[in-house]
Amino acid sequence: MNKLLSIIVPCYNEEEVLPIFMEAVTKVRDGLRNLPDAPCDTELLFVDDGSSDQSLEILKSFHRADSTVRYISFSRNFGKEAAILAGLKNIKGDYAVLMDADMQHPPELLLAMYKELISSKCDSVAMYRDDRKKEGFFRRHFSSLFFKLLNKMSKLNIVNGATDFRMMKRIMVNAVLSMPETNRFSKGIFNWVGFNTKWLPFETGERPVGRSKWSTGKLISYSFDALLSFSEVPLKICSWMGLIFCFIAFMIGIFHFIKTLIFGDPVAGFPTLYLMLLLIGGLILLFLGITGQYLARIYLEIKQRPVYIVKETESDTDKGE
């Protein structure tokens, strides 16, 4: 019996690109099925992240035409991390691959990824972007800085330009699913669980239609969440800065005390005092904000709300027919 590869495709408002993606991935599925050495069957699992366009109707039509095309539809937009988790939880395959529907993860690379996964001793084949020059100056340098900071501030070792485009064996999928946290950063989780990963470079495909859903603001927020999810360094910085300022204040106090005893100079400098109060006050608010972000994550974890809520799946379509 052939092994089964589950292709997980999170999508949000992708009605224009879904038919294009489906046409491209169908050719690759045929190629996987006809491999001479290790033929592989496939299933497609689309995760509709609460789309407001006709994406869900298109997914239903895909399933009616091919029962190996499945879908999960959320009750609202929960975000890509929730879609990734839902996909991994509901696959049937011996292997799983995550990829975007917007064609920026070229479907034709699935063949090379699968061959690498079964021929080597790795448990995962992950893709990293090797074409950063196509991006704007700010995004390119911000992304590079983010990966450097994340690796230094945590125990992770994520390749610069890492993406969610990744193929895994079932044993690694199960390890990822064993982590029940609500605030998820999949790139970090994939790295944290270990296993042997083979990194391959790729050039991002062009979106045939539409624009990226990731604005600069969303990327910054996502990066901040990632840092807080896998590092306690911001809290340690707050503690060390507090000690440093206590030491500085103590030394300034001794200096003015000695100066007054020896020279009889009064302790003057209202502007200095004013600026110091502003600086210290600002730092206190900053540190409280950082601490509050950690507390907010603890609060969300304690409430144990579901990461996502499923509205319907392909089973509902089958029942309706």
Image (spheres, rainbow, N blue to C red):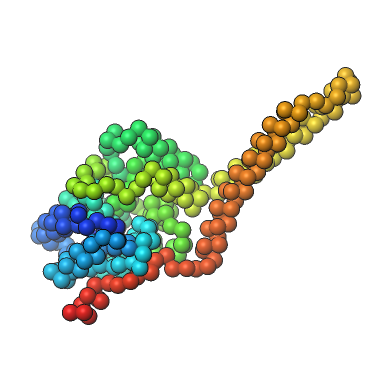
**Residue found at x 55% / y 57%:** 296
Regarding residue 95, the answer to whether it shows in the image is no
Q: Quadrant of the N terminus?
A: bottom left
**Front-most of 299 and 232?**
299
Percent position (x, y) of residue 81? Answer: 38, 57
Please state the horizontal and vertical placement of residue 124, each as a whole percent of the image.
Answer: 30, 54
Left or right of residue 190: residue 266: right
Residue 176 at x, y = what percent? 39, 61
Residue 223 appears left or right of 35: right
Residue 165: x %, y % from top left: 29, 51
Q: Name the residue nearer the viewer: 266 or 63.
A: 266
Q: Residue at x 57, y 48 (%)?
A: 290
Q: Quadrant of residue 266?
A: top right
Q: Quadrant of residue 237?
A: top right
Residue 54 visible in the snapshot = yes
Q: Is residue 184 above or below residue 208?
A: below
